[in-house]
Each structure stands twice: as structure tokens, then as C-alpha cells.
Image (cartoon, rainbow, N blue to C red):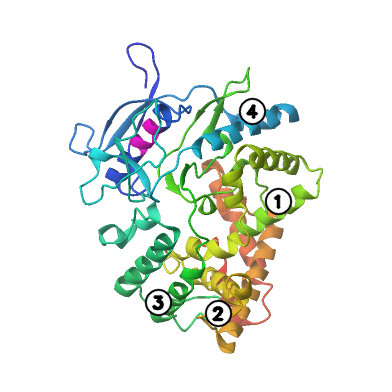
Amino acid sequence: MSMDSGVEVLAKVPNPNAGPAFYTTASEVATRHFLRTVLNLPVPRIHAFSLDSDNPVGAEYIIEEKARGKPLGSLWHHWDTQSQLGLVAQLVDFETKLASVSFRRHGCIYYRRDLAKSLSTDGILMQLNSVSTEEFAIGPLTEARLWEGERATMKLDRGPWSSPLSYMTAMGINEIQWAAAYATPQINPYRSIETPESPDSYISLLNQYLQLTPYLSPGPFRTSLSHQDLHLDNIFVDPDTKKITCIIDWQSASVSEPFLQHSIPRMLIPVDRCSPGERLDAVLKESDAGDSNETIDLLSYYRNISRAKNEQRWTAINLHNRSLLTEPTSLLCGAWSRNDVFSLRHALIHVVARWEEIAPTTLPCPVKFTEHELELHNDELELVESLGEVLHQFQNDNLIPLGRMVLREKYEQASIINHRVKEMFVDMAESESQKALYSRIWPYQD
């Protein structure tokens, strides 16, 4: 939209899938004001907002200035290496500034006045002389997975939390409460296309997670605000000076311990078939080895200057066994809803198998998986990995799209190709029962 003054502005209304409209809007407004006034970081100015849907628009909204500059995604691949290195250095300065202010809690930033008294909590740990931070407080997380479906009306613990352990425990208890109230038997095609799995087995797995939780928390660390999705199109730059002019998409940004945050900006992580934790470990090993690949060179540079400029955060995100400790918590919320109990179980099996790396040698592991449970899981793992290899090959041959996303105008063509490729996959089966299984587990269903 254009104002009478000629200034271009954007209007945002909450997406129903993004989380609770009030908290999502209230937190984004306060977070961006905090970034601009306390940290002096380049984020779009908010001209007006409403936290109440009882207005002429009929919804909560934010009216903000249009981001200055051009999206980095339209320029990045045309830049020379020196220009890219300069941008990486700016990102490190940006992250260092985010980490410069600590908080007492894990949660989202709000204006204190917008939180109910029962939710209000002390916020900033490090007081800044030049700017008052008393108007801010830390409140509940707004991320959609804690509010979607039936969870929206449940009295779940969405924060804030005073320690990593309290956060990890709350995630498990929340999921047990949801599963006990709403989970119903469902088919896990990787195990059987005839016999449904019981929610009781899922709740039992969640209780095993809670038994392990006290040993998964690395201990107290300074919390800080982070941007959870630094991809190329969320960073705006001046094409002439190559300086960052704006960073957008702060919706659901939260304050947390660094080892729970993304370790490396998404724009610097190569895309392959590894899990996020495995991919990051591989990237860091390759950067240590001095790989000549351009992306690895940028990562090596990012790593070196992060370690020098932002040492405390770098130490936390490179914690020994970090992915082993944090992956179960990241996978459990909504695992039953998305029919992916496998990934949570796999993470817990890894914890148990590597128990001696986590706990003192004299402390026995409180959880044990039976030989039968491990056998069933390994059969499922074999099928999951086989499907992954086939999909990766199809992606390499450009038969299916990476990330399951296609342009609208190419959807019909993609649907036809998907149907043919699915037939190719099903024809690999050695029996009729296996064909039925392969057809059921194909991820791109009509």
C-alpha cells in the first residue's frame, strides 16, 4: 500500500496456521520494538497495530514500512566470494548483538502491559543504561505446534521457563496431556497396513522421554533472542554497498538457550538428505578439513569469526553431543499427529545406546528397550532408509521436486510425474503385500 506521503507500507494479518492471533501479534510487535530501540538492529518500523480483532479490519493486524533494499536471494548467487564473505561477517555481527542481551526466562518477548498478571514475569537480565527495558517481559511461546488443533483450547505449559530442564519437561508433559485426551489408534504403514498402533504405546514412549529428561539438559546458559529462519529472502541488502538494510520475519521469534537455537544461518547450510543434526555435524567437520567447496569456505569463515566475536554463544551451540541431547525434545511435539513416532523413538534409542557419553559411568540408564522393540524399530528403519534413498535418486533425476514444493503453474505437470514415479516405486516391490505397503508409504499421495 502507498500512503498519501508516498511511503510504501505493508499490512499483515495473522495466518490461522501461525499460532494464536493475540499472542503472535503482541509478541512480534514488542520483539521488533525491542530490536529497534534496545539493540538498534535493522528491522521494518511498525506504524500501527491492533491486538484486538474488534476493529474495522475484523482481525489483529500490523502495518509496517516496506523493507528497504533488495532480497538477498535475488543477488547472492551473482556476488563474488569477497562480497559473500563480507555479508557473512555482517551476519556474525548481527548475531553477536542479539546475544549481547541476556534474559531470565525462556519464552517470547512482550510488552509487560499486554500480558495478563498471571503471565507477567521479569524479563531482561542485563540492564542497558541508554534504554529502558522495564516495559518488556517474557511470556509464552507462540510457535504454532503448541497451539494447533485441540491444543489451542488446552491448558498447556507454554512458558516462560526458568531453565532448560523445565522447558524440556513441559514439552513432554504437554504431549502426554494431548495424547491422553485426543490421540486415537492409527495405522503406521512402516510397521503394518492392517493393525493400528495404540496411543498407549506413544504415551509409554513419552514417559520414557521424561525419565531421560533430567540427563538431557546441559545445564544453565545465558538465554538470548534469536532469528529462527535466516534464509536468503529474509535478509535485505543495498545492492550497491552490499550492506544489510533490513532483516524480516520475526514472527514467533523467541528467547532461549543457544544450544536450543539454530547453530548456523540456514542460507549457509548445504541441502542434502541428512537429518539437520547430522548435516550440521558433517558441515563442521568438512570446514575443519579445509574443503574447497564454496559453501564450506563460507561456513569455515563464519565459524572462525563467530568463535572470535561471539565466543560464549559459539561454545554453547558447539556443546559436546548437542544434537544427541536436544533432538528428542525437538521431535516430540505433534509426533503422533504427523505419524512420525519413529523419529522420536529413534532419538531416544540413540540416547540409551550412548548413555555412557551422557551420564556418570556409575549411573544406570533409567530406560531400556527390549530386543523385540529394537527389532521392530530396525525393520522400520530399514524401510525408511530405503525409501529415502529412492526419493533422493528421484530428486537427483528431477522426477520429484525438492522439499515437495512446486510453482502453481507447474502443479498439474508435477502431479502427472508424481503418479508415474509412484508407479515405478511400487513396481520395485517383490510381492503383492509389499506393493500395498510401498503404495501406502509413498510420501506424495494424491
Give the image location of residue 344, x and y in percent. Answer: 51, 69
- Depth-wise, is mark 3 or mark 2 nearer the camera? 2
Q: Given contact means CB atoms under 8 Å apart, are the residues at marks 2 and 1 in contact?
A: no
- The answer to whether residue 85 is above or below residue 413 is above
Residue in the image at 45% along x and 26% along y: 40
Left or right of 332: which side holds 444? right
Q: Of the residues under marks 4 and 2, which one precedes in the sequence?
A: 4
Give the image location of residue 81, x and y in percent. Answer: 75, 30
Classify mark 4: residues with Cα within 10 Å, few (<14), some (14-19) or many (20+).
Answer: some
Give me the C-alpha separation between circle 3 and circle 2: 25 Å
Residue in the image at 41% along x and 30% along y: 38
Give me the C-alpha separation between circle 4 and circle 2: 54 Å
For mark 2, what is the residue?
363
Give the image location of residue 43, x and y in percent. Answer: 45, 29
Classify mark 2: residues with Cα within 10 Å, few (<14), some (14-19) or many (20+).
Answer: few
Give me the C-alpha separation between circle 3 and circle 1: 36 Å
| Mark 1 residue element | helix
Label disc, if present, on residue 400 of the rendered structure: none
Q: Given contact means CB atoms under 8 Å apart, are the residues at marks 3 and 2 in contact?
A: no
Label disc, if present, on residue 75 of the rendered structure: 4
Give me the C-alpha separation between circle 4 and circle 3: 48 Å
For mark 1, what is the residue?
284
